[in-house]
Image: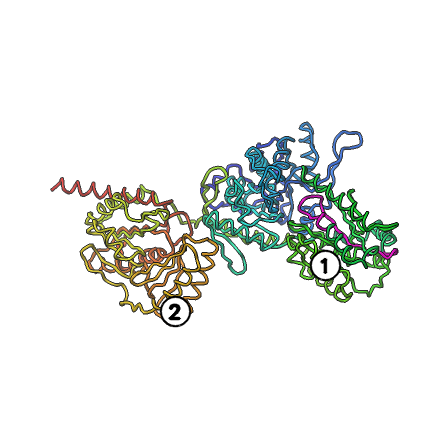
């Protein structure tokens, strides 16, 4: 199979679809210097897949801060020995996808520092043996990136900790942010060395690499890119305090699919997009998506699972059985009931709150003294700093106090294990524990409850060790915090607010007292869910959604716009182009009968302007166009005829259609006509009270009463609340006006009630018909608008091309404002470009008028 990769991607940049078929798989030589891109050419000698009969598999490049690799120095201190890290989610994910279906390549850092002299050799070994591409970072840069920006700024903020004082987390430090961006850029350069951009899927993991999607999208506009956030995403109130909030949001939106563990995290992200970027999302056939510059960005909500095979193999180990036997002697045989906590030693895991709840249990329920033991396994903290030391000191002091108060010979109510445990040892504790307590004050997913449930299901050998007959139903009890990602998935767990120590103590007592059949039912329900929603299910589902989202890539033209982290890609239909000034001016010069239809707000006048009346420059341009006898110029607006009459009174020959075309006049001194039969507006008596109700309850909203329509505008209201109220108002109006001859529509920040059958398309039809009746068949039609109501005009004039109302040689220009999906074939970027275009056409008319006067 011939391998094919790109280096310059000129075809992609030009928006042309490549002419060759599916590319072969190829991993080029890996360079180790940061920022250097390997020479990726068409030479097939480096192809991994050289068997012409083999069917190419999908290839997934998985990118994360750390590779799923353990590195050890060889005994002679020369060279390295590498092995897979069986505990790594990224490795489990690969098993879940299955080697037969998907080839997986990893890009990430090693935990150990590799000397620059050894980096080439290590890269080669890792690529050939493990299909891993290591990213080597200078120690100082890594420290500023990981311990600085990631752990001091992003991680605390995403767990709802605001840096209100220098002691609380870290104040924003721009040099740490620059280090974060630099590392993301180095990761991007590493990916560029190995990617086949048209074929490979890229899956980026977690908050360490949030700006990486921008660097990849900038290099390959059509890259198939998924991103999954493993931590919580905070509410917009917390997130918006981050000085680089927009840069991170825009970077994530350069992905095709963004994954979250829970609906809450996704909802917070979508709310941030709405409040900070003005983007709205919609749910289509069960999939949530955002439109971002013509690209569809999908949102995936699916919690990660555990690796069933790995857990079951550890449960089968003889050392697990031996450890279980040892723990039974230590606890069960002495009539002790074990409660278990397994947490990292950090400020968000709520270890001390759990210890205080244990203390409260022993204070309030003397019957449990001497019987119940809380075993707290404390894993080493991943971050470092003052807060970690404080948690450790508080934990040790609390354990000491409880044991001194309630302990006696042969009984310690709290056993703190702060030494690293082997995985099989931890599993043995799960097997023996009657109840598992996961009471973090804020956490991403936290798979400890899942591991506990599978361990409690056990196997035959462990049943024997526990003295259970094979027919005995299994049982497990969970007390989980409301603030962890797995909480919504575990409906049989006792959910608690970890800050409420009394409630947690009560939950412990409830778990201990619960009847056996109830414990068994809860366990069975949890086991059914956890065993079917494993890591393979999660990975497959994510890849499936990524494939679905990227299906349209080849059908779109792509442009990159913006600088730095403001970069984004505009994706449009293949025949949608920017309106070239030269092209339209040339057509304008050589044509004799011209129809020009212009929207006003958002087209000739920027939406953001507070003063909406036309400038003297706009009036002058319109007058110059109207003076040309070859032109029929029409302004089509949603505004009232009174407002438009006042504003455009200097334009004698300008045609005006108001209220979306309900009223219309061909020039200033002509009578106003109606495009449809005169409306009965008695429906306003029904609609207005309803709108008033919503105006009173929605701060920042207003009602505009026009002659034939009513508009509720919420431009200045809270975006989430305004949008929610608008949906409710739309439903309310549709139900109360069901028997009235009106249409209820939603637009940009408005809900509008208009007479049935009125649309801007009617104006376009009316204009073309009137010109046809006067034997004026236009050979030039220009129609410009910016919103949904203008799409009706575009549709009419583009479908008129083959009809009798236009000249057979007619040149038709339907043009929308900004690059976005539209029925128009052309676009211009903003109102300034439109005014410049109209000025250009007006000056052509002026010249031709001047020439004709000169000749006469």
The disc, 2 or 1, on the residue closer to the chain's N-terminal end is: 1
Q: Position of residue 661 (x, y in %)?
A: 29, 59
Height in image: 600 above or below 580?
below
Q: Position of residue 847 (x, y in %)?
A: 20, 40
Helix, strand or loop at label 2? It is loop
Quarter-of-image position of residue 372: bottom right
Q: CA distance from mark 2 to mark 1?
A: 54 Å
Tell me if mark 1 has few (under 14), some (14-19) or many (20+) residues whose alpha carbon lies within 10 angstroms of its own: some
Q: Give residue 16's mark.
A: none
Q: Residue at x 69, y 47 (%)?
A: 349
Of all residues, the one furthest to the left in this rendering is 856
Helix, strand or loop at label 1? It is helix
Q: Is residue 589 or residue 757 the one in the foreground?
A: 757
Residue 629 visible, this orientation: yes
Q: What residue did someone put label 2 on?
A: 737
Q: Is residue 106 left or right of residue 324?
A: left
Q: Is residue 715 or residue 220 the one in the foreground?
A: 715
Residue 43 visible, this orientation: no
Q: Is residue 123 left or right of residue 661?
A: right
| Quarter of the image where the C terminus is located | top left
User: Which span is picked out in magenta?
Assistant: 332-354
Quarter-of-image position of residue 368: bottom right
Foreground tag (2 vs 1): 1
Of all residues, the one furthest to the top in this rendering is 117
Height in image: 257 above or below 678?
above
Q: What residue did someone put label 1 on?
A: 506
Q: Position of residue 635 (x, y in %)?
A: 27, 53
Contact check, label 2 and label 1, Cβ < 8 Å: no
Of all residues, the one furthest to the bottom in this rendering is 739
């Amino acid at each position: 199979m011939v391998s094919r990769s790109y280096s310059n991607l000129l075809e992609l940049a030009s928006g042309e679809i490549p002419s060759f078929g599916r590319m072969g798989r190829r991993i080029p030589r890996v360079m180790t210097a940061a920022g250097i891109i390997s020479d990726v050419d068409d030479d097939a000698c480096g192809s991994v897949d050289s068997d012409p009969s083999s069917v190419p598999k999908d290839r997934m490049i998985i990118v994360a801060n750390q590779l799923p690799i353990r590195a050890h120095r060889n005994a002679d201190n020369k060279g390295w020995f590498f092995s897979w890290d069986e505990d790594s989610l990224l490795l489990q994910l690969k098993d879940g996808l299955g080697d037969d279906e998907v080839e997986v390549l990893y890009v990430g850092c090693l935990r150990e520092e590799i000397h620059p002299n050894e980096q080439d050799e290590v890269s080669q070994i890792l690529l050939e043996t493990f299909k891993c591409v290591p990213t080597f970072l200078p120690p100082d840069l890594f420290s500023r990136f990981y311990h600085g920006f990631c752990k001091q700024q992003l991680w605390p903020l995403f767990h709802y900790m605001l840096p209100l004082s220098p002691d609380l987390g870290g104040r924003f430090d721009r040099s740490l942010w620059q280090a974060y961006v630099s590392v993301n850029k180095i990761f991007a350069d590493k990916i560029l060395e190995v990617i086949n951009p048209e074929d490979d899927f890229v899956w980026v993991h977690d908050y360490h690499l949030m700006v990486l999607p921008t660097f990849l999208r900038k290099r390959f506009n059509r890259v198939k890119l998924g991103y999954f956030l493993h931590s919580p995403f905070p509410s917009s109130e917390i997130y918006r305090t981050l000085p680089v909030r927009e840069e991170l949001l825009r970077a994530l939106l350069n992905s095709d699919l963004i994954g979250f563990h829970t609906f809450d995290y996704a909802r917070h992200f979508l709310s941030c997009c709405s409040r900070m970027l003005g983007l709205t999302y919609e749910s289509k056939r069960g999939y949530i998506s955002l439109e971002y510059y013509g690209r569809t960005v999908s949102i995936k909500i699916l919690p990660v699972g555990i690796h069933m095979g790995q857990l079951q193999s550890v449960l089968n180990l003889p050392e697990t059985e031996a450890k279980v036997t040892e723990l039974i002697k230590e606890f069960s045989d002495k009539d002790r009931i074990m409660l278990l906590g397994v947490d990292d030693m950090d400020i968000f895991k709520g270890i001390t709150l759990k210890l205080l709840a244990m203390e409260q249990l022993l204070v309030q329920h003397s019957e449990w003294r001497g019987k119940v033991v809380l075993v707290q396994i404390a894993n080493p903290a991943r971050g470092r700093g003052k807060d970690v030391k404080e948690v450790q000191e508080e934990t040790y002091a609390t354990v000491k106090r409880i044991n001194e108060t309630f302990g006696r010979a042969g009984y310690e109510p709290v056993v703190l294990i702060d030494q690293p445990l082997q995985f099989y040892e931890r599993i043995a504790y799960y097997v023996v524990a009657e109840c598992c307590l996961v009471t973090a004050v804020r956490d991403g997913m936290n798979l400890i409850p899942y591991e506990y449930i599978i361990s409690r299901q056990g196997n035959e050998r462990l049943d024997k060790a526990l003295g259970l007959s094979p027919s005995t139903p299994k049982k497990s009890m969970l007390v989980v915090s409301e603030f962890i990602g797995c909480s919504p998935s575990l409906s049989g767990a006792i959910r608690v607010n970890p800050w409420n120590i009394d409630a947690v103590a009560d939950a412990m007592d409830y778990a201990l007292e619960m009847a056996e059949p109830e414990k068994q039912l809860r366990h069975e329900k949890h086991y059914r869910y956890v065993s079917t929603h494993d890591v393979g299910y999660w990975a497959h589902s994510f890849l499936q959604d990524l494939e679905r989202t990227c299906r349209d890539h080849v059908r779109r033209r792509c442009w990159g716009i913006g600088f730095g982290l403001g970069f984004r890609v505009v994706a449009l239909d293949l025949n949608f182009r920017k309106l070239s000034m030269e092209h339209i001016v040339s057509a304008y010069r050589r044509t004799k009968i011209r129809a020009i239809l212009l929207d006003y707000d958002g087209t000739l006048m920027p939406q953001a302007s507070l003063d909406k009346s036309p400038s003297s420059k706009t009036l002058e341009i319109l007058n110059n166009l109207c003076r040309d006898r070859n032109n029929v110029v029409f302004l089509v607006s949603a505004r009232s005829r009174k407002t438009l009459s006042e504003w455009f009174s200097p334009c004698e020959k300008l045609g005006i259609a108001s209220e979306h075309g309900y009223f219309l006049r061909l020039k200033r001194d002509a009578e106003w006509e109606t495009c449809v039969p005169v409306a009965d507006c008695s429906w306003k008596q029904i609609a207005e009270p309803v709108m008033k109700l919503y105006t009173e309850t929605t701060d920042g909203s207003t009602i505009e009463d026009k002659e034939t329509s009513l508009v509720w505008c919420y431009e200045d209201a809270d975006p989430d609340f305004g949008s929610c109220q608008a949906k409710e108002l739309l439903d309310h109006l549709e139900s109360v006006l069901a028997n009235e001859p009106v249409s209820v529509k939603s637009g940009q920040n408005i809900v509008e009630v208009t007479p049935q059958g009125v649309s801007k398309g009617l104006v376009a039809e009316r204009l073309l018909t009137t010109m046809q009746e006067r034997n004026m068949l236009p050979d030039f039609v220009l129609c410009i608008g910016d919103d949904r109501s203008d799409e009706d005009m575009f549709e009419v004039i583009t479908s008129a091309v083959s009809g009798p109302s236009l000249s057979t040689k007619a040149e038709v220009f339907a043009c929308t404002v900004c690059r976005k999906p539209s029925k128009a074939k052309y676009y211009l970027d903003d109102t300034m470009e439109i005014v410049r275009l109209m000025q250009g056409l007006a000056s052509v008319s002026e010249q031709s008028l001047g020439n004709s006067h000169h000749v006469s």
